[in-house]
Amino acid sequence: MSTYACTLADVRAAAARVRGLAHRTPVMTSETLDALAGRQLFFKCENLQKVGAFKYRGATNAVRNLTDAEAARGVVTHSSGNHAQALALAARLRGVPAYVVMPRTAPAVKRAAVEGYGGQITLCEPNLPAREAAANAIVARTGATLIPPFDHPDVIAGQGTVALELLEDVPDLDALIVCVGGGGLIAGCAIAGRGLKPDLRVFGAEPAGADDAARSKAAGRWLPQTGPNTIADGLLTSTGELTWPVIRDEVERVFTVTDDEIRAAMRLVWERMKLIVEPSGAVAAAVALSAAFRALPGLKKVGATFSGGNVNLDQLWW
Amino acid sequence: MSTYACTLADVRAAAARVRGLAHRTPVMTSETLDALAGRQLFFKCENLQKVGAFKYRGATNAVRNLTDAEAARGVVTHSSGNHAQALALAARLRGVPAYVVMPRTAPAVKRAAVEGYGGQITLCEPNLPAREAAANAIVARTGATLIPPFDHPDVIAGQGTVALELLEDVPDLDALIVCVGGGGLIAGCAIAGRGLKPDLRVFGAEPAGADDAARSKAAGRWLPQTGPNTIADGLLTSTGELTWPVIRDEVERVFTVTDDEIRAAMRLVWERMKLIVEPSGAVAAAVALSAAFRALPGLKKVGATFSGGNVNLDQLWW
């Protein structure tokens, strides 16, 4: 394995660091989904993780890996999704401030969620330069450490603990299917999974409406995501400088699914497994159920991520 | 403990009988719900049971406890809810027929569910005499065994395995809260739980709109449910000849909650625990969160049932 942002040893260190802080989430199975997928599926339930998403692992690892002096000055991010909540809780549990920059257009529910975990919100104009400027101003003022949502060695190593635990519970997995947004989860899982088990096959799962990783793999070079359009709102971003090389070299293929396939998989998980997954959280399951994936020979036992369960319950999703 | 329809030994025999057929469901916890309840709660997730409800345990125990000759002639019921599906699957897995009598007004989705598990449906007029007559005709014709939804020793013993497993996982529980419809679950759990641990306190949980057990406990004599009106459609029936004596003697008190409390608890479980529970399945949680239950002193660790997760996902519940 080439040199990436982190190693299997870093993921192991992250596992020790997050133990007792992050849940060791259960692995769930369903005969119904197995029958539809034509093989045995093992779902790692990060929808049952604290804050409702795997993001809490990476945020916790990053916050816990700061020195006391660094930590005391706090942490900053300008993500407004699950990572912001995760970072706020991780910081609160270390007793240090978390500064979260959000566009002034962010929904009230997201602001309330971050504030509920003790995060201090700074509102800014809804564009990336404004968000970066606001975050940099906080760093300049407070000396806080910027913890981005995926392109950071400690975040990637933290997310890799998902694969570490899954392979401890189901050591004879043939493959993993991991959803891809910025790529922190799949990069960490590929490094951990293939580090532990070099013949493990790792596949990416993307919405067709945000398929930068699939296109990048096909082109053999990094391509950005532009104009994403999908129900899977956790997977809109491009992969990063640190995550893309891992995807390029360690991920066999990235499969895409339509929003209809995502919605159908999500409903199936709610209905048959009685688990709430958000659309992004159902993308790996949708890939497992797709004709293209089913056609792959030689995979008896496949692990897949339920990456999160934070979903608006005031709307019908189908 | 007086003489009831079954004993702790029967529940243990049921546990051996259903092993490998029913799921050993997980026990889940939530810091958010603990904070709201003012104590530690341990939820036994029968929403993750086969067929999506605890009913599968009792049905399986009853079907497996038949002799081969009895089983070959099949089983009958005239329940049309989760018990019908549970009995159909339990029979199919023993390779014997299940005859299910349903009112011709039963929703298509319930008919399809029973048929999906291989049950043979007989439609009848929508009243109890017609249902009983149709079931008796099937018994006369086929020699099948009638397995009612709750008032049967093997069914009660099967449901009692819920408490057996919960106490194996969390031996130092101070109390159980169990929802009450016909009373099969609470009777089995009280027999098993107090058999194992005589100082265990067992509480019932009922919707205010179907509070026959609460009224019966208050009156000290069996009272029927008439004109039930609640969102918790699995808890409409009166308790039975076999279940009532256990409730009378072994259940300390039956708490009632309003439909608004049930709906709020259900939403909290979906939102914070990411678990789909049906309204009936959230009634024990609603009691745990109620002011009346919170006011009880001396209960640090309380087990509660998520009894089922079969809910119409095409409607908003709040």
Image: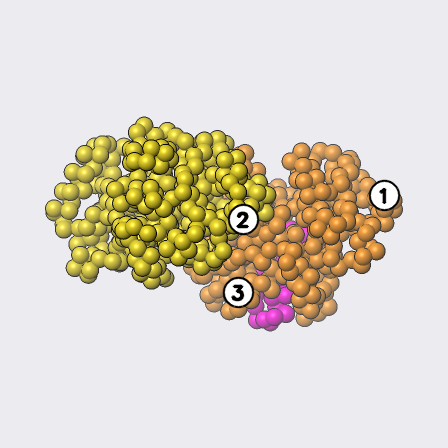
Chain colours: A orange, B yellow
Q: Give the CA distance from mark 2 to mark 3.
A: 31 Å
Does the magenta run of residues contain A231? no
- Chain to which the residue tagged by mark 3 belongs: A
Residue indicated by mark 3: A169
Of pointers 1 and 3, the one earlier in the residue sequence: 1
Distance from label 1 to label 3 (Cα)? Answer: 44 Å
- Label 1 amino acid? Ala
* Number of residue marks: 3
Q: Position of residue B64 (x, y in %)?
A: 26, 58
Q: Which residue is mark 1?
A: A137
The residue stretch that appears in magenta: A181-203
- Residue B300 — which label? 2
* Mark 2 or mark 3, whichever is nearer to me: 2
Mark 3 residue type: Asp
The x, y position of residue A195, in whole percent, is 63, 70
* Labels 2 & 3 near each other (Cβ < 8 A): no
